[in-house]
Amino acid sequence: MTSFPYRLVATDLDGTLLRSDDTVSTRTRDALAAVTEAGAAHIVVTGRGAPWTRHILDDLGYEGIAVCGQGAQVYHAGEHRLLTSVTLDRQLAGLALSKIEAEVGPLAVAASRDGLDGGVLMGPGYRLQAGSDLPYVPFEDPAELWAAPLTKVYIQHPELSDDELTRIARATVGSLVEIVMAGPGIVEILPLGLSKATGLSLAARRLGVKAAETIAFGDMPNDVPMFAWAAHGVAMGNAHAELRAVADEVTASNEDDGIAVVLERLLGS
């Protein structure tokens, strides 16, 4: 059997494992299969909630554990069930939202409801990424936003960049909630202390694997805690500057099989 220096390979989805058309290349699939054959486990760690992740994992034939919702959910893809789920304190989130708006003015807001079938609510003016076909439910009355348990709240500003909004929101409410930037147009309010690292550590414990035995791949600032937790963090060639700054190495982009480039080298192939 081919040797491999890690027991766990943790990969983000969007901008990392997935190409822009939401597919995984044959080369990357083969590299991950070789890693599995060498005795390591592959785990998906994504900012997407489980309802927005499971169809992708089904298409990939992925049957293991996945960390979803920025660490809020540990999902068993093979059994199609949530193993753990952390919800956002809605009163605290509402307070945080009002404090941020007091600083920057009105925000466009969306939110993910808890559960495997939890829908995404989208308020007036909130913009999905170009080409996105993710399902959502529009709302007008702000009371609808807080009517059921949530895993996260998304915020957008009509003029501020994602980086600016993230910086101001963190400075304003960072003692109440977590603020992360997970992708273009995706700035999120999460429970305080929650991150991909907390979710990954829970999942790794279930698999009997330690941080020192883990290599992680990502592309956005929400992957920073995961890199801090894992023994080795690899930023994609298309990664945000904040993540590149803390990475142990930078590989090729998600379009150019960046994950496979590193795994093949570690496998000696």
Image: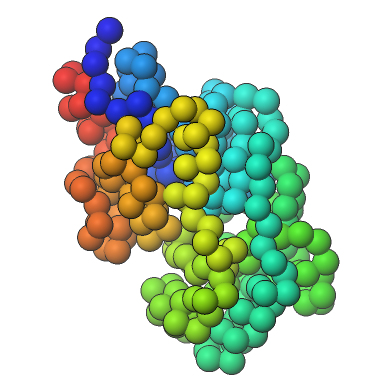
Task: Quarter of the image for the N terminus: give it.
Answer: top left
Q: Quadrant of residue 147?
A: bottom right
Examine the rendered structure and indicate whether residue 160 appears above or below residue 1: below
Q: Position of residue 113 (x, y in %)?
A: 72, 56
Task: Quarter of the image for the C terminus: give it.
Answer: top left
Q: Is residue 251 visible?
A: yes
Q: Look at 56% across and 71% down and name the residue there.
A: 177
Left or right, 95 with reference to 257: right
Q: Look at 26% across and 21% down and name the residue there.
A: 4
Q: Depth check: 86 or 169 in front? A: 86
Number of residue marks: 0
Its colouring scheme is rainbow
Q: Position of residue 60 (x, y in %)?
A: 52, 27
Q: Quadrant of residue 3?
A: top left
Q: Look at 52% across and 61% down and name the residue there.
A: 193
Left or right, 145 with reference to 76: right
Examine the rendered structure and indicate whether residue 229 appears above or below residue 110: above
Examine the rendered structure and indicate whether residue 263 appears above or below residue 112: above
Q: Is residue 186 visible?
A: no
Q: Depth check: 264 or 128 in front? A: 264
Q: Look at 73% across and 74% down and name the residue there.
A: 91
Left or right, 133 with reference to 159: right
Q: Position of residue 55 (x, y in %)?
A: 62, 35
Q: Depth check: 259 or 129 in front? A: 259
Q: Position of residue 45 (x, y in %)?
A: 48, 42
